[in-house]
Image: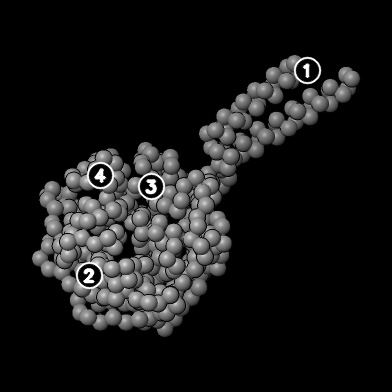
Amino acid sequence: MIKKILMLLLLLAIFFSFLNQYGFTPDYSAYSMTKICEQLPTYNIGDLKDTKVLYLSNSIVVLDYYSNQKVSIPCSSRTLPSLPVMDNTGTKIAYKESRSDPNLWVYNTETGGAVQIPLGYTGSQWDLHNIPRFSPDGEQLAYLHSNSSDDYSLSVADTGGSWKKDLMTGIADLSYYDWNPDNKRIAILAKARGNERSSIYIVDSAGSDIIKIKENVETKQSNLDGLSQLNPAGLDGFCQWNPAGTNIAYISAGNIFTITADGSQEHQLTDDGNTFLLRWSPTGDKIAYLTRDGLGQEYETGHVKKGEYSRLHLINPDGTGHEEIFSEYTEGYLNVLPFTWTEDGKGIILFNSEGGYLMDLEKPTGYDPALIALVALGVAIVACAISIILEYYRRA
């Protein structure tokens, strides 16, 4: 009897050690994951590419997580108004040093110099989120700026600082946009001044043409949108061109849609209302996206509860082939799972509270070993407890 009680206590100790290590609900991945980077300040990750991650520590840091080489970028302020972004090569970094700074800065990690891009005013209380975005070739920088809460402009500048121009004016501050791979067109999901809902526009960065291809896109001004704006790792998570530059994927009311560049064909991919970020694969044959449990119910108010599952999914552009590939019970808000595709489209780089991981999409894992061990321990504990109870009644 005593031996069985001691055995039960030992099993309980092992069981709770598993819970402490993995949490009450262990992380789940459908594919093999290899750790490539130690834990980073996840909430401070500003941008993420195939080989590099940009984050805030005591300065702006660009880390190549395969070679472990770091470049620190000097800036006068330790509290930036929004997180910085980098170009596709990770050699150009765009940031604003303070809320009142009337400039954007483009820092070159190879030369060590910074180029000043004047915003054209002495600072505005409304200019919290300029949301800079480099063109695919890194030669141009698009950004938002404003002197009032409902009159933003989309502008573009040469990253060398030689010229700049306004492309679109009279838009509200809720805007998400993405460069076409041709470096000439920008798709912008934005509200025109005074409108309740957003529209999708195609803006010619070289000329003045603006074409509206979609109306009545439901992106509410709420905490959900504010969190996405605060996290540039998800800036193209609401509106993104496919690699061929022919279709745009966007999110409306928490669901994913695709639309052709001329607006003639549209297709809805998801219907659960829980999506808040998406990424096309480099080959264009998949879309990866993040959901948050219960987000659809909370979307109207913009209230996001802590302590929910964040889930990473894959889906085909025609809406078929859906699969959930990763889930994690998180205590934070929406920006706790920054991810990006590898350049060959065969893997996903994912950062969570434990560090950075390479998920190999060609190597399914099957069942999670930690979950199997946890279930086995639970069964052993129940069996041991039943044995003790039966022996107690037998002796009574």
Above or below for 162 versus 106: below
Cα distance between the residues tagged 3 and 1: 51 Å
Q: Label 4: few (<14), some or many (≥20) within 10 Å?
A: some
Residue type (three-letter) at the residue carrying disc 1? Met
Q: Secondary structure at mark 2?
A: strand
* Secondary structure of residue under mark 1: loop
- The residue pinned by badge 3 equals 43
Name which of mark 4 and mark 2 comes first in the sequence: 4
Task: Determine the residue located farthest toward the left in the rendered image.
Answer: 162
The reply, left or right, for residue 62 in relation to residue 234 is left
Residue to which mark 2 is pinned: 155
Residue named by callout 1: 1
Q: Which residue in the structure is indicated by mark 4?
A: 78
Q: Nearer the viewer, mark 3 or mark 1?
A: 3
Q: Do the numbered discs 1 and 2 sit on residues whose CB atoms are within 8 Å?
A: no
The answer to whether residue 127 of the structure is visible from this angle is yes
Residue at the spot 65% in from the left edge and 32% down from the top edge: 377
78 or 57, which lies in front?
78
Spot occupied by residue 23 in the image (x, y as percentages of width and height): 55, 38
